[in-house]
Image (spheres, rainbow, N blue to C red):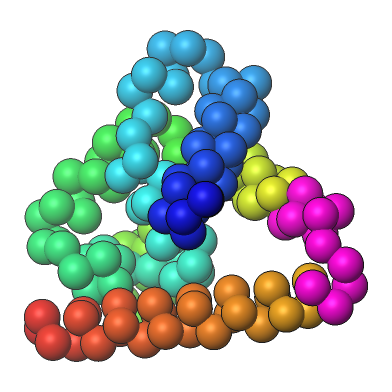
């Protein structure tokens, strides 16, 4: 089996697990209106630790009006809230609500479950090697993504 096929199978496994798990915490109607972009924003808001609109726009490499529109949708759905900055009342910070955290936690649980499944298949030495290789790959990917953002701005 080619590497590409194996990666695709892993992605399909994660996707199915994610869909099954997220459907347990969302109604069919809510799930059908929840997009990958919604999750992408929730992840970045969490990672950036309650960013301002400008910080989020910069991190995502999108315009501030695009961020404003998406944050309005996420606020209307109850996934995020915006609060005035204590330092500058003209600025707003974006926070995950309990609902937003619940959805993000569900995704993280899927990845933890997948990591557990991998560790069941590998010996301790294989797991160390696998972890080392994954860290090497993700480090390269992060570096390339950072360079792309810098080059685009």
Does residue 85 appear in the picture of this structure? yes
Q: Check residue 124 for magenta coloring.
A: yes
Whether the magenta-drawn stretch holds residue 15 is answered as no
Residue 102 visible, this orientation: no
Between 52 and 21, the one nearer to me in the picture: 21
In this rendering, position of residue 141 left or right of residue 73: right
- Where is the C terminus found, in terms of image quarters? bottom left
Q: Nearer the viewer, residue 131 or 51?
A: 131
Please tell me whether residue 152 is drawn above or below residue 123 in the rendered image. Answer: below
Q: Which residues are magenta?
A: 115-126
Which of these two is toward me, 34 or 70?
34
Up-down: is 65 above or below 27? below
Left or right of residue 95, residue 59 in this image: left
As drawn, 33 above or below 109 = above
Name which residue lies at 38% across and 68% down.
51
Looking at the image, residue 146 sits to the left or right of residue 8; the answer is left
With respect to residue 45, does 28 lie above or below?
A: above
In the current view of this chain or complex, which residue is farthest to the right? 124
| The one of 147 and 11 positioned closer to us in this rendering | 11
Counting from the top left corner in percent of width and height, residue 149 is at 21, 80
**Residue placed at 41% from the left, 62% from the top?**
44
Residue 132's x, y, as percent? 66, 82
- Overall secondary structure of the magenta section: helix
- Which residue corresponds to the image point at 48% horizontal and 59% vertical from the top-left? 3
**Percent position of residue 121, x then y:** 81, 54
The number of numbered badges drawn on the structure is: 0
Quarter of the image where one finds residue 52: bottom left
- Residue at image position (69%, 75%) is 131
């Amino acid at each position: 089996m080619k590497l590409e096929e194996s990666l695709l199978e892993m992605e399909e496994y994660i996707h199915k697990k994610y869909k099954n798990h997220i459907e347990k915490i969302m109604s069919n109607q809510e799930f059908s209106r929840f997009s990958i972009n919604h999750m992408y924003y929730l992840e970045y808001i969490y990672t950036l630790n309650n960013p301002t609109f400008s910080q989020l726009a910069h991190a995502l490499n999108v315009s501030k009006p695009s961020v404003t529109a998406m944050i309005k949708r996420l606020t209307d759905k109850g996934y995020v809230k915006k609060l005035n900055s204590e330092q500058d009342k003209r600025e707003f910070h974006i926070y995950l609500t309990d609902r937003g955290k619940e959805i993000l936690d569900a995704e993280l649980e899927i990845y933890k479950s997948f990591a557990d499944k991998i560790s069941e298949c590998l010996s301790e030495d294989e797991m160390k090697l696998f972890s080392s290789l994954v860290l090497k790959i993700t480090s390269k990917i992060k570096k390339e993504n950072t360079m792309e953002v810098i080059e685009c701005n």
